[in-house]
Image (cartoon, grey):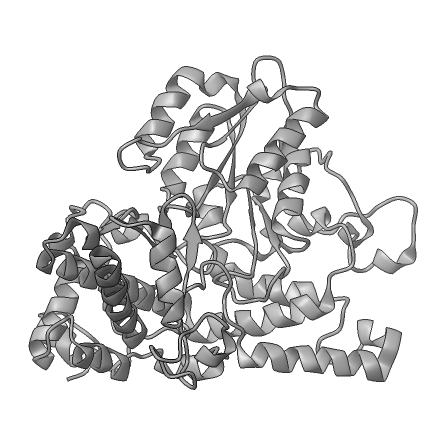
Amino acid sequence: LSYRQLHIMSGSSVNEGSPIPMLTIDRDRSSKPEGSKIYMDLQMYAQCCKHDVDSPDFARFMDEEDPMKAYRERFHIPINRNFRFVAPELVALGDCCTYLCGNSLGLPAKESLTMLEKVSSSWSHLGIYSQFEGEFSGVNCDGKCEKLLVPILGALEDEISVMSSLTVNLHIAMTRFYRPNGVRCKILIEDHAFPSDIYMAKSQLGLHGLDESNLIQLKPDPETQLLSTQIILDYLLDHGHEISVMLLPGVQYYTGQCLDMELITSIAHERGIVMGWDLAHAVGNVPLHLHDWGVDFACWCSYKYLNSGPGGVGGLFIHEKHFNAPDLSIKGWWGNHISTRFSMKPDMEPAPGASAMKISTPPLHLIAIHYASLMLFHQAGMENIQRKQRLLTGYLEVLIRTYNEKTSCPKRVVSILTPEHPSERGAQLSLQFGVPASEVHSLLEKRGVICDLRKPSVVRIAPVPFYNTFTDVYNFMLHLKHCLSSLASS
């Protein structure tokens, strides 16, 4: 039975040849796992194929029927023997590792490395003329990426600028949007923001002669460790008139929580606040509609879910409503209009839209990697990517909850810090344990599971739709059981 046949059996209408609507997300539905569409889909598939959901046969069935299964072969997957910490008595060294760390660093697409070779060849054969000639010349390489980012970001092409890196772009955006004026002089971020965002905000205050008392770090709920929209609303009702810029993460790096960007942006604007988003863990991972949401600015990196390499080129979004406003941000020559960029005039003729924010010559090799990876997103389609993402992460959640129901030892229980509802998370689940997370992580590494530890107590697991399989998720859970059993009995 295929996904399509199973979906028809469930009473849904599916046109032949159309994408299979495996998941529908209702934001108002109860967040209880037994009430979620994903949970019901997985249980329905298990019943129809006559395999338990926590069996290897079920994982293999899901992999065989996966419409995106061919994409895994287009990526380089590390093998176990590449890692010094893998124990040969526990896993076969010649097998692929269980790589679940795409939230930290995505794996390279084979096409990306081919593209890198092409631009290197062009450089070696043409020298300076490689900037102007060939399939992927330097003068327009960034623009090719911007076209491909339109459906990923939900933005107009002119609102996107491929440039620099995440923190640099945040600084550039803040030089334009952070204009402290009287009592409205504060910057609001979250209490557990990624450190680089904190450093950026503090330095922006310092550039305006303001001390750190003007940085508001909003604390999450102490019990759930999540930053709810209600917490943000309650604070802004009393203090919104003091906030100049609010910068929040689309997906929080530690908890994996996806914030309600549309609603929070609307709330900020009602209070006269400029709304910016750090999309490091959101871009290529969760649905984005930056233009329709009216987001003022957003910045992101490309080396996580966009699979564009360590230190890959970043990006900046500026909503078109700001295009005609006075632009007091810092400038550089690549922000010139492409038709006059090489005229070397003393006065700048700005490029249209967000491209006017560009500073320097784009890094051709990094952008070549980025372009090839974005082409895979273009070929697969964001709806299909996000559909599989919800199933993969939903499957991981179901396996964890099924395991918890069968264990009676508190030390073996796995807690999920990330919200249950699919609209409130992306690929990542942040896990906590009744034993030290560092010890769990160490034992997982010995078994060839590549994931990351975030202190004080979280192991982050992120199955990525392009190259992860349901068998990867099943194998992770199998290894985790062994690790917890070993630690609980020691």
Measuring from the top left, give residue 260's x and y in whole percent: 36, 42
In the rendered image of this protein, does residue 344 appear above or below residue 247? below
Determine the residue positioned at 70% across, 47% down: 357
Circle count: 0
Q: Position of residue 342 (x, y in %)?
A: 88, 59
Q: Residue furthest top?
A: 182
Q: Is residue 69 visible?
A: yes
Front-most of residues 9 and 252 = 252
Q: Is residue 55 left or right of residue 423?
A: left
For image coordinates 57% across by 55% down, the residue present is 301
Q: Is residue 55 shown above or below 211?
A: below
Work out whether 191 lies above or below 18.
above
Residue 292 located left or right of residue 169: left
| Residue closest to the eye, 254 or 289 | 254
Q: What residue do we see at 55% from left, 66% from top?
A: 148
Image spot of residue 346 (x, y percent)? 92, 45
Q: Can you give x and y, in whole percent of width and height, for residue 431 in the image?
A: 31, 52
Q: Is residue 359 left or right of residue 210?
A: right
Out of 451 and 236, give the one closest to the viewer: 451
Q: Quadrant of the C terminus?
A: bottom left
Q: Is residue 463 visible?
A: no
Q: Nearer the viewer, residue 321 or 318?
A: 318
Residue drawn at 78 percent across, 54 percent down: 360
Task: Report the quarter where the N terminus lies.
Answer: bottom left
